[in-house]
Amino acid sequence: MDEVDVLVVGAGAAGMTAALAAHAKGMSVLIAEASAAAGGTASTSAGTLWLPCVGAGRTQADAGCEEQARAYLHACIGPGADEAKIDALIRTGASLLRFLDDHTAVRLDAVPTHPDYLQFLPGATMGGRAFAPREFDGRTLGAAFGRVRPPLPEFMVFGGMMVSKADIPLLLRATREPQAFVHAAKLLARYAMDRLRGRRGTRLVMGNALAGQLLQSVLRAGVPIRFASPVTAVRRRRQGFHCTLGPAGSPEALQVRKAVVLATGGFSGHAGLREQWLPPAARRHSVAHGGNAGAGIEIGRSLGGGVETAHAQPAFWMPVSTMQRRDNTTAVFPHIVLDRAKPGSLAIDGQGRRFVNEADAYHHFCEAMLRRSGQHPGNRFFLVADRRFVRAYGLGLIRPGGRTRRFERAGYLVTAGSASELAQRLGLPADAFAATLRRFNENAARGQDPDFGRGTSPLNRHNGDPGHPAHPCLAPLDSANLCAVELHVADLATSVGLATDEDARVLDAGGHPIPGVYACGNDMASMMRGSYPGPGTTLGPGMVFAYRAMTHLAQEPAC
């Protein structure tokens, strides 16, 4: 029987961080990953970490910054805020980044301007709390490149080329500006060479870059990963744990001397737990990718762990549109920043009325959808624009300047030559929608939104179009060339999870730490308790508490 000091269950960002920290502290580690690829949900995300109070040179920021961050987190989370976890996040971010710089291939840079999502709350800042991964060359992984979970197909162009947010405007201007043309030509040449050798491009950005960097670090450290090896049982022994892992036909036994770290990604893929913990309007779709079938939570409960459910929201939300692919699978497209905030769109419900500031952050946009669904069960939601908007910015699955015919044939895009025709095709009350559109257009022409304040916050303007001549977030729609896609609420990650302390130790029903059992990432109940302060709300704490867990284990062996 094999033996290790630490078993990490799950090869997502938090799991690989925990494994690297344990290895750096002299412990033997095995990562057991249920799927055939590493990266988990992080690989399909923007890859940003929200880490307050990291000063220049990865030093701890001053007391004033800490006070400001605490005020903001308390205002976001509300009365249930855990002071010890807030302190842990604030005090550990710089240490995590120094560890990653010194011991891994992960390279994260501060994003100079990226507003916190709730700018009206005390302690919010315009930037300095978001850290994004650098572009990563997947070719350096060699044969292991195939082990990086790919991004969502709809987030790649030409069948397999990743593009970042910064690439998009350059690609759109490639035929008009020499600098943009050179950039686009380099991307396309690199991608063409990649496709001669493989299925997709090896230039990795955003969350895929983070996943690639972490996987490279794990492989260089010599930490073994067993893919397609779900952990099916963990039983406590007098000395450590006896674990069973591997496919059903050929399970293996593993003796774990010190600790089990649960990092399987939460319960987004577990039908029963979704039914139990998510509201009806949010159960159908998920953008969480990689299984996330609640295995870590179930293992934690089997060892006596409690679950924390009293959160403002049980998950973190994102509005999505869906379309059936040619292979009969469903494309789920997250509407993050590429369309909702741009001038010339509006969101309506099934009564034909606006219900939200379209330029607000995705989680808060969906909170408005859920509130409206609570008032009107079975409500539907649509993002409405015009043809001019689609050419300039795209709309969901439709890329800027892209052709729309196949999306219309698939029923994804609904088009109309008037407000009454669009209302009829969407099943809306025609008079109500016409009044909504008329009021929106009149106010947008004046650069105002007295109903929801769209464009008044720094975040709104950051996500809008600063190059638009009239207003970064507002423009009237051409009522003779309307189109719409239907929106749904989907979870991008779960908030409810195993109860833990500030060192990620799983707690029992009485609030006492269970020796040798840790949870991080989305298996750990989020310290944000269903609130969403800024970009990287899940990845930042996920990796911080993974690092803290192994720091704690090295100082005080759990078993």
Image (cartoon, rainbow, N blue to C red):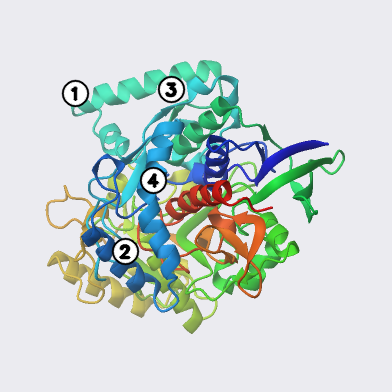
Q: Residues within 10 Å of mark 2 (few under 14, many from 20)?
A: many
Distance of mark 3 from mark 1, alpha carbons?
20 Å
Image vertical order of residue 66 relative to residue 146, above or below:
below
Q: Residues within 10 Å of mark 3 (few under 14, many from 20)?
A: some
512 or 537, which lies in front?
512
* SS for dot 1: helix
Distance of mark 1 from mark 2, alpha carbons?
34 Å
Residue 340, x across and y down, in percent: 33, 58
Q: Quarter-wise, where is residue 89 in the image?
A: bottom left
| Residue at the limit of the structure toward the bottom, as seen here | 375
The residue that mark 3 highlights is: 191
Residue 347, x across and y down, in percent: 36, 66
Image vertical order of residue 151 relative to residue 68, above or below:
above
**Residue 474 visible in the shown view:** no
Image vertical order of residue 290 relative to residue 63, above or below:
above
Q: Residue at x 45, y 41 (%)?
A: 207
The residue that mark 1 highlights is: 178
The residue that mark 4 highlights is: 95
* SS for dot 4: helix
The residue that mark 2 highlights is: 360
Q: Residue at x 38, y 50 (%)?
A: 93
Q: On the rendered structure, is 558 left or right of 130?
A: right
Q: On the rendered structure, is 11 left or right of 438?
A: right
Amino acid carrying label 2: it is Asp
Q: Decide which of tag 2 and tag 3 comes sooner along the chain.
A: 3
